[in-house]
Image: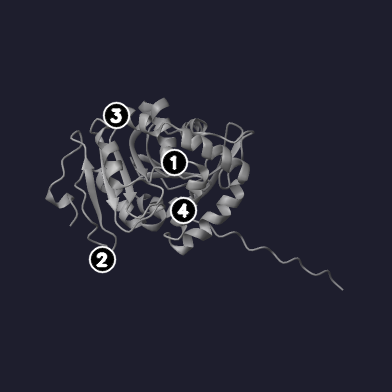
Amino acid sequence: MGTKATPRRAPRRPESSLAERWTTVDGINLFYRESPVPPDAPAMMHLHGFGLSGRYLLPTAERLADEFHTLVPDLPGFGRSGKAGDALDVPDLAHAAARFLDDRGIEKATLVGNSMGCPVILEFAHHYPERIDRAVLVSPAGGLYNQPLRRAVGQLTRDGSREPPRMMKVAVPDYFRFGVPSTFKMFRSLTQYPTLERLLQLRIPTLVVIGDRDPLMPGASRVQEVAAATDNHVLLVKIEGAAHAINFSHSGELAHLIRLFMADKPIVDDPGSPGHARLYEIHRGTHLPPADDRGIGR
């Protein structure tokens, strides 16, 4: 009798229409997704949040991939990427992001971050101001509002009930992979990070996007107060109905908003998405192109 053939394992289905690739940065295997490079397209890198990978950023990143050289890495210690000898903190992740761009031969990029990705962007801009074109800070997290840990856990729990159910299928495996020891060290680094100080140092056009159902963010009035203190280079936009993971839950609205910001156009709702979440600006710095009447709600 012949031996029974071993069934072949079906190849893993790609998670994204972006190409899935590996590289090595500082001796660590780094997983990332990358779009084909349109001619003369500016580079845009998307940076994920606490404990997560770049998977949940893909809905927004894919919508922008035809217009920008789009990169979505899993930072060292997160997602499918390898871990460093010690868990990384916010400055370490910013330096790792810069070295990843070096590896890809990219001198300058617009950085789009969600949650923890926003402090990483601010630290990147602090050390490499000549390498960042614009900053897009979506649901920026960290600082006193998310302390102590039990309060942050409660905020995350409330947020989980406000996100699309399919977000949990993405987030839960990432959190388990990240692990408890890394969680405590990264949380300490994130909540001690001088977010406001770094934001005030920025001198580039900056878009801040918040959701009105995000329990990890202070109220819009406090966010607006901070934005108004940043030497008038910040555009602050609120998306009604959105919680924390806007890049996943409201990718159409966010991608539309990013396109307008990158083109210095007034903020208006997407005419192709009638009846969906409304977005409108609540602060525009005087150093940014002015909005007309169409830019305030609809």
Q: Nearer the viewer, residue 263 or 11?
A: 263
Q: Is the residue 264 above or below the residue 158 in the image? A: above
Q: Quadrant of residue 128?
A: top left
Q: Which mark is residue 56?
A: 4
Tell me what residue is drawn at x 55 percent, y 56 percent.
Answer: 172
Mark 1 to mark 3: distance in Å?
19 Å
* Rendering coords of residue 57 (x, y %): 44, 51
First-in-chain label (4 vs 1): 4
Quadrant for the C terminus, please.
Answer: bottom left
Amino acid under disc 2: Gly
Q: Is the residue 183 above or below the residue 127 in the image? A: below
* Rendering coords of residue 171 (x, y %): 52, 54
Q: Nearer the viewer, residue 266 or 142?
A: 142
First-in-chain label (2 vs 4): 4
Q: Residue furthest left?
A: 293
Tell me what residue is drawn at x 53 percent, y 34 percent.
Answer: 89
Q: Quadrant of residue 158?
A: bottom left
Q: Is residue 184 left or right of residue 16?
A: right
Q: Are marks 4 and 1 in contact (CB under 8 Å)?
A: no
Mark 1: give few (<14), some (14-19) or many (20+) Cα within 10 Å.
many
Please name the residue that numbered disc 2 is placed on: 275
Mark 4 to mark 1: distance in Å?
12 Å
Mark 2 to mark 4: distance in Å?
24 Å
Quadrant for the N terminus, please.
Answer: bottom right
Secondary structure category for the residue under label 3 = loop
Q: Which mark is residue 117?
A: 1
Amino acid under disc 1: Gly
Q: Which mark is residue 203?
A: 3
